[in-house]
Amino acid sequence: MRALVLGAAAGGGFPQWNSNAVGCRRARSGDLSAVPRTQASVAISADGNHWFLLNASPDLRQQIEASSCLQPHQGLRSSPIAGVVLSGGDVDVIAGLLTLRERHAFTVYATPRIHQVLDGNPIFEVLARDVVTRRHVAVGMPVMLALPDGSPSGLDVALFSVPGKIPLYLEASTGEPSIVESEETVGVMVSHGSRRLFFIPGCARMTEALARRLKGADVVLFDGTLWRDDEMLRAGLGSKTGARMGHMSIDGPNGTLAAFKAIDVRRKIMLHINNSNPVLLDDSPERAEVEAAGWEVAYDGMEIPV
């Protein structure tokens, strides 16, 4: 199995279009220690010819043009993209589906709740239903990822609930949403034979069940949104904590570094990294700390053999 990081940043990308913070200024200036990144998505393949996307980022067109393996290779119109697996309904997860509207056959895999979100917004009808299949995947039930002709791709996928919250645009106008485990925020496990890759771009906290699930994994691509919970407040960049946004922080006693100390994973990679997070900067103390703890920080174009 091959995996390719198409985008490694959180919503807004790095640099974010309206941010003049230090990290974003460094990225715009061409600073080699502040490498730009698009919004989080990963492509996976068993044969190197047919690819499945894990989330459809708003930057998908740019990501395709940067990745020769995802570009047309046959006839006047074609694509190696055979399907899209969604981990939720946030804008930075589903907006890229609109890029795939040119009557290309593929399958959208998501929980029934996320399909309900898509069905409820008529703009997604540009994905013609006579061409694009919408496959409901029950939480905890592995399914085969199929090629457009229905034949096996060699990959299986399972969706599982992780602590999270509903998408911002679905929140009620009053009250703060609870962190729950439901169909609206899921992790993705892709397997090829005995090999297992986990894609978890959003997770509010580590649970015993999740730790057991991840034990022994070959690759875990995990939520690296913020370095500390109050990061955006301290920097004057926003009014929400990481916990309020449904993301656990990297640092701290309940953070990602601490949570993974007791979890045996062969390769640990952070992605969905907010533009405020200093781990995006190659020369930061925070980057040195995560690398010393055995983590890698994802970047666009990162190839991951599994």
Image (cartoon, grey):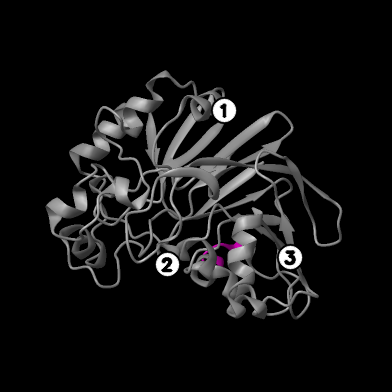
Residue 81 placed where, x, y %?
68, 62
Give the image quarter of residue 14.
Answer: bottom left
* Residue type at tag 1: Arg
Image-based side of 90 in relation to 44, left or right: left
**Mark closer to the observer (2, 3):** 2
**Chain part drawn in magenta:** 64-69
Q: Is residue 106 visible?
A: yes
Tell me the residue at 51%/65% (across/down). Answer: 63
Disc 1 to disc 2, C-alpha distance: 30 Å
Q: Which residue is mark 2?
A: 169
Which quadrant of the rendered structure holds the C terminus? top right
Q: Which residue is mark 1?
A: 213
Q: Residues within 10 Å of mark 1 (few under 14, many from 20)?
A: some
**Mark closer to the observer (1, 2):** 2
Residue 295's tag is none
Q: Which residue is mark 3?
A: 106
Disc 2 to disc 3, C-alpha distance: 27 Å
Q: Are marks 2 and 3 in contact (CB under 8 Å)?
A: no
Tell me the residue at 34%/60% (across/down). Answer: 36
